[in-house]
Image (cartoon, grey):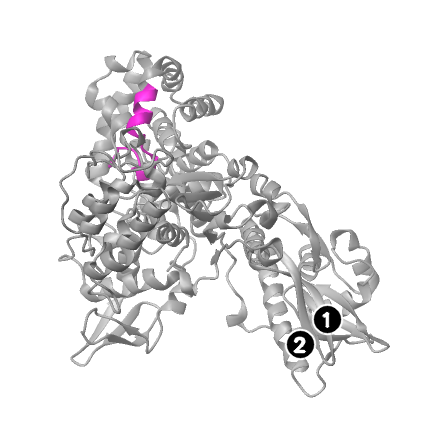
Amino acid sequence: MEIEQNKKQLLDYLNEIAPWEGWRSNYNSFVPKFIIEASKGGDWNEWDEHLFYEFFERSNNQCVSSLRQGYFTKEEQKAIKENWTRIAPVLQKIALTQDVPQFETYNELKDILRDYTRVDRRASTYRLIASLQPKILCTIVNHAKLNELITYLNKFVSGSQISFSYNWFESSNHVLAFFIKESGYNYKDIITYPWQLLEYFKGNHHIEDNDMSEDAGSSLKTEINLLQYKKQIILQGPPGTGKTRMAKEIAKDCIELTVDLFRKIIYKNIKISKGGDKQSYIISEVTDETIVINDSTAEHTLQIELIKKYYFDRSFLQSDLTSFDERGLLISRFIYDNILAHSEQFHLVQFHPSYSYEDFVRGIEARSAGTSVEFHNVNKILGKIINQANQNYLDSRLYNDPVKAADAVSFRTKLDRFKEVVTEAINGENGEYKIPNVTAKIMEVTDVGFRYVFPNTPNVNHNILFIDLIKLNELGVEYNTGNDVKLQEDHLEMKSKSPYYFHTYKEIESLDLDKEDKLPVATRKNYLLVIDEINRANLSSVLGELIYALEYRGEDVESMYEVGGSNKISLPPNLYIIGTMNTADRSVGHIDYAIRRRFAFVDILPKNLTGETGVTFDHELFNKVTGLFVKDYDPGIDYSIERDKLQASTHLSEEFRPEDVWLGHSYFIDKSKETDGAGMDVRLEYEIKPILLEYIRDGVLKETARAIVNALPNEVKESN
């Protein structure tokens, strides 16, 4: 929960924070040497090996803002060394100029490194540049986190009017300059403070010296980084590799646990299972700061901040839980397991061969209207989430204008209250809401506006759109007559309806609000749509004109269906799409090149889960079955990364690749301890063997595999 207080001087905040000395010491040890080495412009093998390792080869806990998804892979490290003659002169140019920002050179280095990395390693690039010019760039290398800090600074710190920029270099420079000016500290003393102040403002005052990792609990940083860059990705792999589960885990990491969302999940009288046959805890009270839980033996009070820390750090996933509060872990895990079910920012849909544009984007819906049936164009699942995400995106852009933001929030709160008033009237005796001073009557509150009719033409529908009412408010004009509204029609979707808009607007404006009705200004949220089995539908048909919108976010395309007076539709930048695709399913069509290039594809391959926390994994059976697909399988290799080491078994048909059909690890997890779960004997006979035998019938596996499959779980001595 964010702290609430009046503005203070920056130095007053810093005096309340003890700097992370371990990380500061590490930084001051390496960064000056890095600048000296880079300024020489020498070959990489002439560098001090420990120094080169620290900045280009380390895979965790790097000395400048450890962002775990930002590290270079082994393959990328090799490419950087091979092309060092391009990189060294740019590093040298930046290092030789310590006091002046080199924005063009920063971008030059970023573009060069992008040539040799599988994905855009922005964090890696920013970290290098921040190390080369520590006097003018701060150590928060994640742009979203940096913008979050700027928001807090402008809100809570006197004299802070830092503008937001789409350029990380500019934002970073402005933040560090503000810290130096307001604190009077040397840049070397400021190193950890931007991070620590961000944590302070978020209420995490208890956080101790750490490695500066962002969202350290997550293991999906590469996938999340790719999603943020590309906006839509597809997780592809053979059956049983946990693609849908991973999609949900990515979504969980992208959705912020706000106070409102926390209270939707955690509330009085819900039960928190202890696992097994143990009696559950029951939540008896929830305050702003604490949760009270009890069982038959005792009552326990827990701090919400502790639970949130466990949640953000994913403490419940660690192997050694002895240092954690057991009850706090249970509640944080409960939140993790239930956050998607309670969040309006997450939606999941599964495609199938008959799925169409009318099912997914926009279509026609039949509604009963007394003795007749009316047909309406409506948004479907994608259209609805687009509206949600776009509204949040527009709301969040009001953040820099507090007066305008407060007025907009007040009006939208009144609009929500007016919807309730109108709905109550429609549900009442007369079944309608009479718009004052005109003959029009509102008959329905729809997803997009108020549907109204006239007494002499009751079968002809008209609409007053919510977006138009909000736009009228945002224009900041004083409306005294319908003609004042008419003068603004160029800004509205609906035309020639000014009298009805005017009187409705004045009704909304006249409502009084209590203090508790005034909502906080919206912050930008991520909206996630997971499309399971994305390749089972005809994507060209389902997406229609949105194939263009996937690549050009924010640009309008014209839908074949007009909803709410407009046929325009666009994908906002805060909407992310994750598809899953079973590569073994040859009964469905392939994704064409036009659509394929708009998605980033991530291979999810089987892996040995031995040693994973909370998993009982039958590694012996997994290895035996894997031998049907992979030659000389090595459980120590991550084949998703080192694909060149993946060789086909002699039992696999030459038409197939092991990465497309290799049976996934989820088949080999013993679920006997789960409610309604099954042990490996059941899973082998009714899940694993049937799909392997089907593979043989379909020609995926050769007939030589039959004896091995039938003998499982026993060994058949046969070379492959």
Q: Which residue is drawn at 57% across and 56% down?
A: 360
Q: What x and y, as percent, mark residue 183?
A: 36, 40
For the view shown, which residue lies furthest in the right direction?
Answer: 456
Quadrant in the picture for the C terminus = top left
Cα–Cα gap, marks 1 and 2: 21 Å
Which residues are the magenta region? 60-80
Q: Which of 456 and 676 is in front in this view?
A: 676
Residue 453, placed above or below residue 521: below
Going by the numbered disc 1, the residue's amino acid type is Glu
* Residue behind mark 1: 374
Q: What x and y, as percent, mark residue 467?
A: 67, 59
Going by the numbered disc 2, the residue's amino acid type is Val
- Label 2 element class: helix
* Residue behind mark 2: 422
Q: Which residue is drawn at 36% across and 25% down?
A: 133
Left/right of residue 456 with respect to residue 181 in the rendered view: right
Q: Nearer the viewer, residue 557 or 650?
A: 650
Residue 62, placed above or below residue 469: above
Residue 669, placed above or below residue 176: below
Q: Toward which corner of the image does residue 292 lie, by quadrant?
A: bottom left
